[in-house]
Image (cartoon, rainbow, N blue to C red):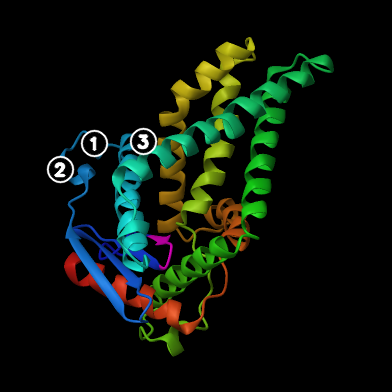
């Protein structure tokens, strides 16, 4: 993606776009008006050469995006709240985030490696056992995304996610940024965070193979300690996928694009308008 804009995120009834110098959050209020909030934000990877090194920058960007996403979630939720009693604060959001992280560790780290150990009854080959664990991790990821996609509120988030991708695809194709011109563009994009999740699962299979197949607790501790490295490597893969047009890179990106069929939905014009508003604000600040 051009340096004017290199990231985005669907958040409740709005869209957050991240440029090299700022973030812009556009939210559709209950009265149908669109409010845009812009904040100066120079990426940590640009402040220090060390933080901008390959692999390291992936971990830093992930943490940075987490904080920006929480801030955007609070802002968008409060803009659509009926009254002050329904507004979110950092305490409530932090508690929810902690619970979510613990659940994610249990579902996507502990459960796959524990169940993968059952394969030891049939083989002692570390490669096959790690492949089984990775397959289970990908299965849990797909099952989780598929299950929550039926929730009404999540479906609207997925529509805004699709709107974000359509706008970015339109911009990269040089099209006019209006609902009518953006509408024909696809809801899939190679630099999507959904693809990142899949790359994390695949990279973990390759990396953990080098650790063999120790006891359960050693495997769990190894997976947790190696998580930053896995995230950093996955970030480099998705970065390459976004910059390269080679057939091989496209082939590597294909599974991630397929996964986006679960994490995006076709938006309506009103949702596209919100995505356009966020994009324009981030792009103007980025220039």
Q: What label does residue 47 carry, if any?
A: 2
Q: Position of residue 84 (x, y in %)?
A: 30, 60
- CA gap between label 2 and label 1 equals 8 Å
**Residue at disc 1, secondary structure:** loop
Crowd tier of the residue under label 2, counting other residues whose Cα lies within 10 Å: few below 14, some 14–19, many 20 or above: few
Question: Picture quarter containing residue 15?
Answer: bottom left
Mark 3 touching mark 1, by CB under 8 A?
Answer: no
**Residue at disc 3, secondary structure:** loop
Quadrant in which the N terminus appears: bottom left
Question: Image height check: is 212 above or below 83?
Answer: above
Q: Which residues are magenta?
A: 9-13
Q: What label does residue 220 carry, if any?
A: none
Residue identified by numbered label 3:
55
Quadrant in which the C terminus appears: bottom left
Question: Picture quarter containing residue 279?
Answer: bottom left
Crowd tier of the residue under label 3, counting other residues whose Cα lies within 10 Å: few below 14, some 14–19, many 20 or above: some
276 on left or right of 116: left
Q: Nearer the viewer, mark 3 or mark 2?
A: 2
Question: Image height check: is 23 above or below 223?
Answer: below
Mark 2 touching mark 1, by CB under 8 A?
Answer: yes
Question: Image height check: is 28 above or below 245?
Answer: below
115 on left or right of 189: right
At a point 42% along the width and 43% down the height, the residue shown is: 235
Foreground of the two, 147 or 64: 147
Can the viewer see residue 58? no
**Residue at disc 2, secondary structure:** helix
- CA gap between label 3 and label 1 equals 9 Å
Residue identified by numbered label 1:
51
């Amino acid at each position: 993606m051009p340096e004017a804009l290199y990231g985005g995120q669907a958040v409740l009834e709005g869209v957050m776009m991240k440029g090299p110098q700022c973030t812009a959050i556009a939210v559709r209020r209950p009265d149908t008006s669109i409010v845009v909030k812009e904040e100066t934000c120079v990426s940590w990877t640009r402040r220090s050469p060390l933080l901008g090194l390959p692999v390291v920058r992936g971990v830093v960007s992930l943490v940075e995006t987490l904080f920006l996403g929480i801030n955007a979630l609070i802002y968008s939720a409060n803009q659509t709240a009926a009254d002050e009693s329904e507004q979110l604060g950092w305490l409530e959001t932090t508690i929810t985030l902690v619970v979510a992280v613990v659940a994610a560790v249990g579902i996507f780290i502990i459960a796959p490696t524990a169940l993968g150990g059952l394969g030891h009854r049939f083989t002692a080959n570390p490669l096959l056992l790690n492949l089984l664990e990775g397959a289970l991790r990908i299965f849990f990821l797909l099952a989780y995304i598929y299950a929550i996609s039926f929730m009404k509120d999540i479906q609207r988030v997925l529509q805004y996610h699709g709107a974000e991708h359509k706008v970015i695809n339109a911009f990269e194709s040089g099209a006019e940024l209006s609902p009518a011109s953006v509408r024909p563009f696809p809801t899939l994009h190679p630099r999507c965070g959904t693809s990142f999740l899949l790359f994390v699962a695949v990279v973990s299979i390759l990396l953990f193979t080098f650790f063999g197949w120790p006891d359960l607790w050693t495997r769990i501790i190894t997976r947790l300690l190696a998580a930053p490295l896995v995230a950093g490597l996955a970030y480099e893969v998705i970065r390459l996928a976004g910059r390269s047009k080679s057939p091989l890179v496209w082939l590597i990106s294909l599974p991630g694009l397929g996964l986006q069929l679960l994490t995006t939905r076709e938006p309506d014009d009103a949702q596209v308008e919100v995505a356009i508003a966020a994009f324009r604000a981030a792009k103007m600040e980025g220039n």
